[in-house]
Image (cartoon, coloured by chain):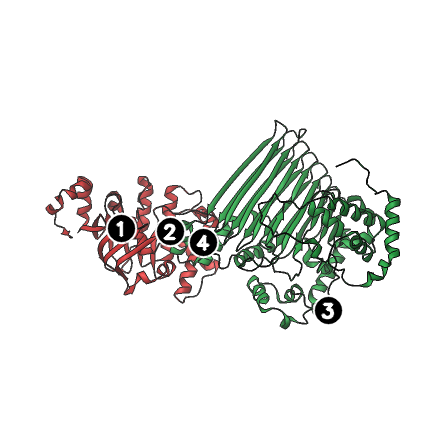
């Protein structure tokens, strides 16, 4: 690339914006969707539609221009049909109530059956299935009580769009500081066209009084395919955040490219738990969500701690590496993961632990389960920077194979720049023991129960890290996801 | 209880059992001895229905039912129990949880109500006491990190909870020191009853000092070649299996099979 300056100074951007608006773009803003395709106009349109401030539009445009120069990465152990990004519509407003199912009677019975198996409470089913909002009064009231209590504690928990309007300084201060727009292809794309997401701010010294869950952020419905989340924990604060839910959500977008940024200041702790159960495609590998996520936490302050826990059972393709940048001295990063692939699902997931500060510690526990023709790869980087005296990492990564058509792969990368570092890596691969299975059968336990029991045991170390009720759901979810995997 | 007629079985295409006959009455303990590779463990696995053990001829009638038609878990629910030679570890699965799942699966099969955790704990405590097993074992994952002795005792403990009609102890004595052996044998003896038959598969006579069998069979080359009372085991111990081949067996008052 040449060093030729890009035309990005603010006057030229302003000029550009003006010009486009003059071309009558404003008149379109009331419409509900933009036509498929991505160009600079679309980025402007989204920003205008959301009534965003100038700086954010500029930020998006910068990301867009960076993205133009990038190519889709192909280093992952994934077999991906080319994605036609020009065939996607980059903005669609939430559906109006008229277009939604009017009651559970209008919902696909198969979906309801799954809710049943997962034990989803009746009043939650309607919301998950996308039934018109006024029919879903229960969750609304729960959401309202929730908000009051948080406000009392000084915690900000709202949609990203609201945050841009109500707390622009905070958003501007932290947005893109952990995952810069140029970070990677999908992060750049997200930065240019992100739809909505969550914003969380925990002020100094506050321990968030409850688990924050997207489940209860009622206006989170259909945040769309380009979700953006930012969580900031000030000095000595603490928050536990839950994302997703075990029940399959109705979703018509094939491509998901979310970005999550976490910032932990001195002594702060963020615990981020994910249960991802997007549509995985059918038994023949037709359909299903492509999930390309960039998640990163920055342990910016001394003695801060960020802990990722994920249970990934959905999506046709998962490409995801929740990471920790351990900048502060004595900061701690953790990654606990269960990734399950069945049928034709593919996952390439893992983490990056970047040790920069002294006496930093990290721990990685990864459990991959493959069944059917599923392919499961663990990819993890542990980097100890030159100045990271006495950094320590422990990695344990176990794979379990169920049946003969699936695969498990491990790609650990270890870069040690300081001789005082201690890095441990343990890896195992086991076929679901024929021995174990027979042992269970011989005691009278059915094959299906035996498999879910063995898998549950295999995942125990990770489930332990999940909040209680989530752990119970996660277990049920694995059972449902493994149905028909044996026999 | 059990009647096996002309049983032939192969493992990986290789014939192991070659026309085995065996009859066990209710409440009896039969020991099956024999040299390595004779087919002792294969017999246990065939009765339990393990994958990969293919029956090519013969029949196994258990309490009037054709056992070979049943799935392994159905056989278990019908009261067939195999104490494994190498009990399997299942990491992360709690021992108590596992056993309760097993018991409840069997109760459900028999049309009985499932036990809740309180009822089950009560039952477990009773059995633990009888077998002198510390309840520390119950808090750990199934066989994970158990010593050899603990694993074997855990098998007998499971047997005590599941109360099978036919128990097959597959080399339960292997890898045990003499104290552990005695404990295991004591446990088995407590489980002797009129309506429970036990097959003790063993290589050595020493287990039979503690669990005294009603009948001793010698299994060689896929067939029962001799049957007798406990004295047969002692003689075998004295003379070794080669003695069998040299026709020494005729000297004893035992039934000799073709």
Q: Is mark 3 on a helix, strand or loop?
A: helix
Q: Which residue is drawn at 45% across and 46% down?
A: B136
Regarding residue A464, the answer to whether it shows in the image is: no
Residue A183 position in % (x across, y down): 71, 42
Cα–Cα span, label 2 and label 1: 34 Å
Evaluate whether label 2 is on the same chain as label 4.
yes
Q: Mark 4 points at which residue?
A: B98
Q: Chain B is drawn in which colour?
A: red
Evaluate whether label 4 is on the same chain as label 1.
yes
Q: Chain A is drawn in which colour?
A: green
Q: Mark 1 points at which residue?
A: B15
Q: Is residue A269 left or right of residue A6?
A: left
Q: Mark 2 points at which residue?
A: B157
Residue A124 position in % (x across, y down): 65, 64
Callout in the foreground (2, 1): 1
Q: Is mark 2 on a helix, strand or loop?
A: helix
Cα–Cα span, label 2 and label 4: 13 Å
Position above or below: A118 against B180: below
Say few, some or many: other residues with alpha carbon within 10 Å of mark 3 (under 14 / 14 to 19 / 20 or more): some
Q: Is mark 1 on a helix, strand or loop?
A: strand
For disc 4, the chain is B
For disc 1, the chain is B
Cα–Cα span, label 1 and label 3: 70 Å
Callout in the foreground (2, 4): 4
């Amino acid at each position: 690339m040449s060093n030729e300056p890009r035309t990005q100074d603010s006057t030229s951007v302003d000029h550009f914006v003006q010009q486009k608006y003059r071309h009558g773009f404003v008149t379109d803003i009331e419409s509900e969707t933009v036509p498929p395709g991505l160009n600079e106009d679309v980025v402007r349109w989204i920003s205008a539609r959301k009534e965003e401030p100038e700086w954010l539009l500029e930020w998006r445009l910068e990301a867009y221009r960076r993205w133009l120069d990038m190519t889709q990465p192909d280093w992952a152990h994934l077999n991906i049909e080319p994605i036609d990004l020009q065939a996607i519509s980059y903005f669609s407003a939430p559906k109006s109530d008229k277009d939604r199912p009017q009651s559970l009677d209008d919902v696909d019975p198969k979906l309801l059956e799954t809710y049943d198996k997962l034990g989803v409470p009746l009043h939650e089913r309607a919301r998950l299935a996308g039934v018109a909002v006024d029919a879903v009064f229960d969750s609304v009231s729960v959401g309202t009580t929730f908000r009051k209590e948080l406000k009392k504690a000084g915690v900000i928990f709202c949609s990203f769009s609201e945050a841009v309007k109500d707390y622009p300084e905070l958003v501007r201060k932290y947005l893109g500081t952990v995952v810069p727009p140029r970070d990677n292809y999908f992060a750049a794309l997200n930065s240019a066209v992100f739809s909505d997401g969550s914003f969380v701010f925990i002020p100094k010294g506050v321990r968030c009084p409850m688990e924050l869950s997207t489940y209860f952020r009622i206006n989170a419905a259909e945040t769309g395919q380009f979700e953006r989340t930012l969580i900031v924990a000030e000095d000595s604060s603490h928050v536990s955040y839950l994302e997703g839910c075990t029940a399959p959500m109705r979703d018509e977008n094939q491509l998901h490219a979310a970005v999550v940024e976490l910032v932990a200041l001195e002594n702060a702790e963020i615990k981020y738990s994910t249960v991802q159960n997007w549509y995985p495609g059918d038994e023949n590998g037709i359909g299903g969500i492509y999930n390309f996520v960039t998640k990163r936490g920055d342990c910016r302050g001394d003695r801060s701690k960020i802990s990722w826990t994920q249970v990934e059972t959905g999506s046709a393709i998962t490409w995801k590496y929740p990471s920790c940048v351990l900048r502060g001295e004595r900061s701690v990063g953790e990654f606990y993961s269960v990734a399950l692939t069945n049928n034709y699902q593919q996952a390439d997931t893992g983490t990056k632990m970047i040790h920069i500060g002294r006496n930093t510690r990290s721990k990685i526990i990864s459990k991959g389960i493959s069944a059917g023709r599923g392919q499961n790869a663990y990819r993890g980087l542990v980097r100890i920077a030159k100045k990271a005296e006495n950094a320590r990492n422990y990695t344990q990564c176990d794979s379990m194979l169920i049946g003969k058509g699936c695969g498990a792969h491990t790609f650990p990368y270890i870069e040690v720049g300081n001789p005082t570092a201690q890095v441990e890596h343990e890896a195992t691969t086991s076929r679901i023991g024929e021995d174990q299975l027979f042992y269970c059968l011989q005691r009278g336990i059915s094959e299906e129960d035996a498999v879910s029991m063995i898998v549950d045991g295999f995942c125990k170390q990770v489930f332990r890290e999940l909040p209680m009720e989530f752990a119970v759901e996660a277990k049920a979810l694995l059972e449902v996801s493994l149905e028909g995997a044996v026999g | 209880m059990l009647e096996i007629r002309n049983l032939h079985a192969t493992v990986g295409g290789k014939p192991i059992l070659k026309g085995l006959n065996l009859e066990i009455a209710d409440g009896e303990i039969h020991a099956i001895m024999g040299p390595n590779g004779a087919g002792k463990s294969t017999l246990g696995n065939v009765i339990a229905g393990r994958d990969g053990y293919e029956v090519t001829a013969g029949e196994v009638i258990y309490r009037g039912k054709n056992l070979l038609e049943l799935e392994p878990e159905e056989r278990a629910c019908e009261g067939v129990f195999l104490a494994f030679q190498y009990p399997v570890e299942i990491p992360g699965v709690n021992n108590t949880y596992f056993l309760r799942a097993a018991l409840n699966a069997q109760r459900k099969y028999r049309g009985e109500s499932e036990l809740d955790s309180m009822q089950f704990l009560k039952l477990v405590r009773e059995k633990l006491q009888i077998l002198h097993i510390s309840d520390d074992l119950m808090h750990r994952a199934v066989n994970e990190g158990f010593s050899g002795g603990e694993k074997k005792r855990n098998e007998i403990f499971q047997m005590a909870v599941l109360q099978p009609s036919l128990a097959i102890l597959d080399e339960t004595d292997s890898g045990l020191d003499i104290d552990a052996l005695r404990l295991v044998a004591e446990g088995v003896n407590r489980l002797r009853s009129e309506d429970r038959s036990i097959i003790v598969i063993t290589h050595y006579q020493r287990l039979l000092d503690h669990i005294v069998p009603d009948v001793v069979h010698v299994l060689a080359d896929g067939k029962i070649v001799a049957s007798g009372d406990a004295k047969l085991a002692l003689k075998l111990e004295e003379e070794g299996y080669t003695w069998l081949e040299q026709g020494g067996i005729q000297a004893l008052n035992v039934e000799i099979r073709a």
